[in-house]
Image: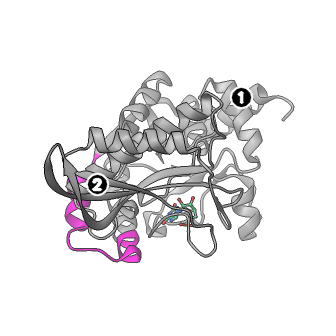
Amino acid sequence: MKDPERFIEEKVAEIEEADGKAVVGCSGGVDSTVSAVIASRALGEDLLAIYVDTGYMRKNETEDIKSLFRDMDINHRIIDASEEFYEAMEGIDDPEEKRKVIGNKFIEVFEREAEKFDADYLVQGTIAPDWIESGDENRDTIKSHHNVGGLPEEMGLGLIEPLYDLYKDEVREVAEELGLPTAEKQPFPGPGLAIRVMGEATPKRTEIVREACHIVETEIEEAASKGEMERPWQYFAVLLPVKTVGVQGDKRAYGHTIAIRAVHSTDAMTANFSKIPLEVLDRISTKITNQMRNEVNRVVYDVTNKPPGTIEWE
Ligand code: XMP
């Protein structure tokens, strides 16, 4: 991109033309964050960034978003909807059903907040590959009508898509110009940790996988930063539905099993399991079973490629 500063100025000027208030859903991804910052510069208090805590977020995710909103001076609302999500997920153990319940609940909560704010527009972080694939040729930043991709059309909101013509590397240049963190983040699925708890994703089981995911992430990132290994494309923990026998001190224990998953991939269509050094696996396993000694007494490593396995376990 020739001039990111000029791009930002132009988009801000375009969005200033919008007549009314706008909402944007932000979960920390670079596209939606950059869109939110640009829209916020144009609309000030007339923009509301909404973050929905589904209860299936990673450790510290909500806190990180909060400080990002504050640092960027974006008008925002953090909705702790975890109780509502947990309740909706009670008794549900089928992976596709989980996705459906979480997707619907998300729309319900988001819509409720957008209505409270009396929004006229929805800001979306759509980038060029998103619409090139779906064949859309409407190239304006502000549209009165739209396909909001998941959010129900009856919301009747106009669309603001400041990054419509950009590719990922250009978005990163703009992010840099805005002073946003641009480090490549690993992908995180929309349904969040719910699909990393095999079976019913109760609050308690989710808490276990949240802690285990945090340990896997921090240990792998530290090992990668020390040059012990390459940072995998995606890496996380899965809570299995099996308990196994172990020893705790001199007593018999019966605890949960955690699987570590780490893969290399370029497009998520195929993937190879990461050949993590055994010393790193050893540290992860020891940390999980020490820090979570009352819950987890066994850790295994997934050595399956995709295909035949998928990256996630559900
Ligand atoms: P699989 O498990 O199908 O995952 O090999 C491929 C990539 O997609 C992510 N993933 C999802 N992302 N909603 C999402 O937004 C989902 O329901 C979902 N399921 C899987 C997964 O993390 C991986 O990066």
Q: Alpha-carbon neighbours of circle 2 within 10 Å: few (<14), some, or many (≥20)?
A: many
Circle 2 is placed at which residue position?
206
Q: Is 94 a magenta residue?
A: yes
Circle 1 is placed at which residue position?
9
Q: Say what amino acid the circle numbered 2 marks.
A: Thr
Answer whether labels 1 and 2 touch (C-beta < 8 Å).
no
* 4 relative to 90, above or below: above
Q: Is 38 a magenta residue?
A: no
Across and down, in percent, residue 146 comes to 60, 64
Q: Secondary structure at mark 2?
A: helix
Image label count: 2
Q: Say what amino acid the circle numbered 1 marks.
A: Glu
| Left or right placement of residue 50 versus residue 140 in this view | left
Across and down, in percent, residue 83 comes to 20, 54
Closer to us: 109 or 129: 129
Residue at 63 percent across and 69 percent down: it is 306
Across and down, in percent, residue 173 comes to 74, 32
Q: Alpha-carbon neighbours of circle 1 within 10 Å: few (<14), some, or many (≥20)?
A: few
* 25 relative to 86, above or below: above
Determine if residue 6 is in view.
yes
Closer to us: 233 or 65: 233
Badge nearest the viewer, 1 or 2: 2
Residue at 15 percent across and 55 percent down: it is 252
Q: Which quarter of the figure has residue 195?
A: bottom left
* 57 relative to 148, above or below: above
- CA separation in Å, label 1 and label 2: 43 Å
- The residues colored magenta run 80-100
Residue at 27 percent across and 52 percent down: it is 297
Determine if residue 21 is in view.
no
Which of marks 2 and 1 precedes in the sequence?
Answer: 1
Across and down, in percent, residue 249 comes to 17, 42
